[in-house]
Image (cartoon, rainbow, N blue to C red):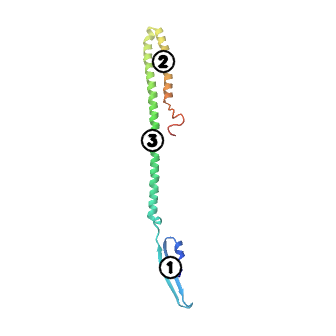
Amino acid sequence: MDRGRHAAPSFLHQRTTGHYQFRLEANGDGLSNRSERLWQFSIAPTFYQTRWFAIAWVGFAGLSLWGLWQFRLQQVQRRFALVLDERTRMAREIHDTLLQGLVGVAMQFKVIADYLHSSPEIASERLERLRKMVEHYIVETRQSIWDLRSSALEAADLVTR
């Protein structure tokens, strides 16, 4: 059995896609009896070698990158919102504590101002009481700020969590 007749020529396994010509020359007796045949053929690309596949792949990669970007953006926005909410809560707590103390101090000053002309001894006692009240408000404000610190945040802040 002649394997050369039925087997595909080995050059076909090494060619890439495209159009080719196969020229066959035969010389029967070595003289002027030459015969030449031209065989034109083309090798079609496989599906992953086509232009539409490359475009689809680039589109898929682009959509994947966009999706990952949107996911990361949402994570960052969520973390930022948590930090902003915590800062707002802390500011409100500090503001309420300080405001309450300052309103009390302002009312005491009004009372002391009324006693200053009529009874200086009572005004002096009230000033001493007001000084102790301010010291108490300072301690209370410091404690309020200290209480705002979360034990979970001692090791890491909100951004790294």
Examine the rendered structure and indicate whether residue 15 appears above or below residue 117: below
**In the image shown, does 102 or 59 lie closer to the viewer?**
59
- Three-letter residue code for mark 1: His
Between discs 1 and 2, the one toward the N terminus: 1
Q: Which residue is at a point 49% across and 20% down the rendered structure image? A: 136
Instruction: Give the alpha-carbon distance from disc 1 to disc 2, as whole Å.
Output: 109 Å
Residue 51 falls in which quadrant of the image? Answer: bottom left
Between discs 3 and 2, the one toward the N terminus: 3
Which mark is drawn over residue 150?
none
What residue is shown with label 2? Answer: 133
Between discs 3 and 1, the one toward the N terminus: 1
What residue is shown with label 1? Answer: 6
Circles 3 and 1: CB distance less than 8 Å?
Answer: no
- Estimate the x, y position of residue 131 in percent, counting from the top left: 50, 17
Q: Residues within 10 Å of mark 1 (few under 14, many from 20)?
A: few
Q: Which residue is at a point 45% across and 36% down the rendered structure image? A: 84
Image side of residue 121 versus residue 30, left or right? left
Examine the rendered structure and indicate whether residue 26 appears above or below residue 74: below
In the rendered image, the residue lying farthest to the front is 1
Q: Which residue is at a point 51% across and 19% down the rendered structure image? A: 135
Closer to us: mark 3 or mark 1? 1
Instruction: Give the alpha-carbon distance from disc 3 to disc 2, as whole Å.
Output: 42 Å
- Estimate the x, y position of residue 15 in percent, counting from the top left: 52, 72
What residue is shown with label 3? Answer: 78
Secondary structure at badge 2 equals: helix
Secondary structure at badge 1 equals: helix
- Estimate the x, y position of residue 46 in percent, counting from the top left: 47, 67
Image side of residue 73 versus residue 10, left or right? left
